[in-house]
Amino acid sequence: MKGSSTALPLLFTMTGLLALCTGVVWLVLQPSLLATYHYNQYVIAATHLFVLGWICSVVMGTMYQLVPVALETKLYSEKLASVQFVFHVAGFVGMVWSFRVWHMTQLAHFGSTFAVGVGLFVYNMARTLRRAPRWNITATAVTAALVWLSLAVTAGLSIAAAKCDYASALESSPPALVAALLHGFQAAGGFVAHFDPVSAMHAHAHLGGVGCFTMLIVGVSYKLIPMFTLGELQSRRRAAWSIALLNIGLAGSFVTILLRSPLKPAFALTVVAALAVYGREIAAILRARKRRALDWGIKYFLTAIVLMLPMSVLAVVLSWPGLPLSTFTGQLENLYGFLGLIGVITLAIMGMLYKIIPFLVWFARYSRQIGRTRVPALADLYSARLQALGYWAYLAGLAATSGAIVLSNETGVRIGAGCLALGVATLALNVGKMLAHFFKPALRPSALPASLTPKTA
Amino acid sequence: MTTNEITKETIIETLRQVVDPELGCNIVDLGLVYSVSITGKKVIVVMTLTTAGCPMHDSIRWGAQQALAILAGVEETQVQVVWDPPWRPSMMSEVGRNATGAGTF
């Protein structure tokens, strides 16, 4: 049997988990991150730790494994993916540090390193998508997410470029290629400098958060939710509309946020409409499912989808042109970002990790034993009790932190982040249990009936 | 070494050792095995999976092949995965429905 390597997806996933653990501990230690306005170096550093370190790492690792499987093809290049891992880790670690100390020149260096990694990732995925024998709604969503990811990185680099000084670097007569890059950055930075920096940052964040990650949640769940619940997509048309509306709404939102346009609510409502159509299709899939019991992994994921509702209300409120620029509004913006990244996206990923990591471990450890001996099922690799404890702790953390953010209360944020940390710790413990199968496999002799004789009997 | 008499029943019973790790149920009771044909010491199994693009595709097919390959009396095995007719939950046996929590149809 030939299968793609699971080592690299696991490496990406473990990197992501490490970043998530670091991120929640950071929130506990520095609750002011969420209790004060977000346009400062610490919040931007922590946000990039969550987005690039946690979300991007896991998303990229699992896409290398699952996109080829879901589209019935093979990954274009595993070697390229390994090279990307190096650029990815060096890039995001350096970026978080550069933001933390607010060193814009180093940020440009590490941002470029990260961007090279993203370029390799997008190229590898695009070549993989081109090989797909059949095109479906998931492939469309993955393609859109890759485009938005590329734009998010380009926008981020341009925002960083606007804060850099090029005079000294250009005066030192660098090699032609470096000089060309510097001129490119200077031009991009000069263009971005025409816009309000906070608006540019918000527009950039939406490209990544909605364009890449929400798009992937929507597109991938049309494949995974039916697969895990023994159901099927109920309406291809509805699924297609959700993806189309999300793309239109995001394109419009990006421009209107950047320009502080009064048309912002129209496009925010378009995104909300996309999510409403998506929610309706997921509800229809669930109603028609044959596997009645929902496991905790699916419950995490579905809770993330439910959290899109308060997110949508906040999005519309915050897009309103007449909204006063008060401290309270700033805290609502914090809540919006928090619910988006730590609520919807993180909870959805945690749920899917309870499907993906057992699969990666099982595939690497047991796929060659199946049929010869009795191998454990995926659900046997971790503790459902820990999963349930983690679910409730995480939900309590989201609720407590959300309340504390609105009230600008640091103690409340610390308590809420503590609950989030407990939720993340249960995931880490369960991941440890899963990885333990590499060292202590749970194999049992085959239960072949006595009437059947194996060749070696 | 004893040699089994290879019958369709022995093959089906052997395939019950292959469990879909996501659903926690064997491939026979899941209704994934469409046909078994035996020609001398060659066994051909035609089966499907619950969904096209299932991440366990290769593993389950490999498992079925391995389970049969170790049976005395079997010298050649061929496991073909087909998508037509597509699998439906109603193809599960009562054991399969209970194992997956699918209930009745």
Image (cartoon, rainbow, N blue to C red):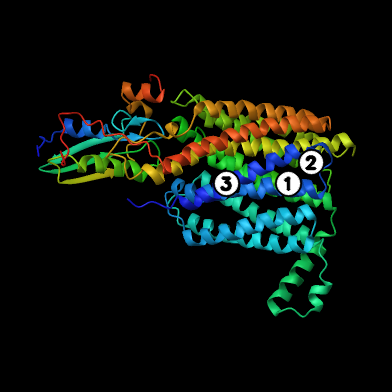
Choose mark 3 or mark 1, whichever is in front. 1
- How crowded pointer 3 is (Cα within 10 Å; few <14, some 14-19, many 20+) is rated as many
Label pair 2/1, CB-CB below 8 angstroms: yes
- Determine the chain carrying the residue at label 1: A
- Does residue A299 sit above or below B104 in this rendering? below
- Identified by mark 2, the residue type is Leu
Label pair 3/2, CB-CB below 8 angstroms: no
- How crowded pointer 2 is (Cα within 10 Å; few <14, some 14-19, many 20+) is rated as many
- List the residue tagged with mark 1: A46
Query: Is residue A26 rendered to the left or right of residue B98?
Result: right
Q: Could you tell me which residue is drawn at 77 percent across and 35 percent down?
A: A335
Secondary structure of the residue carrying numbered label 1? helix
Secondary structure of the residue carrying numbered label 2? helix
Label whose residue precedes the other's in the sequence (2 or 1): 2
Q: Name the residue nearer the viewer: A193 or A169.
A: A169
Query: Is residue A332 rendered to the left or right of residue A148?
Result: right
Label pair 3/1, CB-CB below 8 angstroms: no
Label whose residue precedes the other's in the sequence (3 or 1): 1
- Does residue A369 sit above or below A102 in this rendering? above
**Residue A150 appears at what percent x and percent y?**
64, 56
**Residue B96 appears at what percent x and percent y?**
34, 25
Label whose residue precedes the other's in the sequence (3 or 2): 2
- How crowded pointer 1 is (Cα within 10 Å; few <14, some 14-19, many 20+) is rated as many
Per the model, the C-alpha gap separating discs 3 and 2 is 24 Å
**Residue A256 appears at what percent x and percent y?**
79, 47
- List the residue tagged with mark 3: A58
- List the residue tagged with mark 2: A33
Query: Is residue A188 rendered to the left or right of residue B83?
Result: right
Secondary structure of the residue carrying numbered label 3? helix
Q: Name the residue nearer the viewer: A445 or B5.
A: A445
- Identified by mark 1, the residue type is Ala
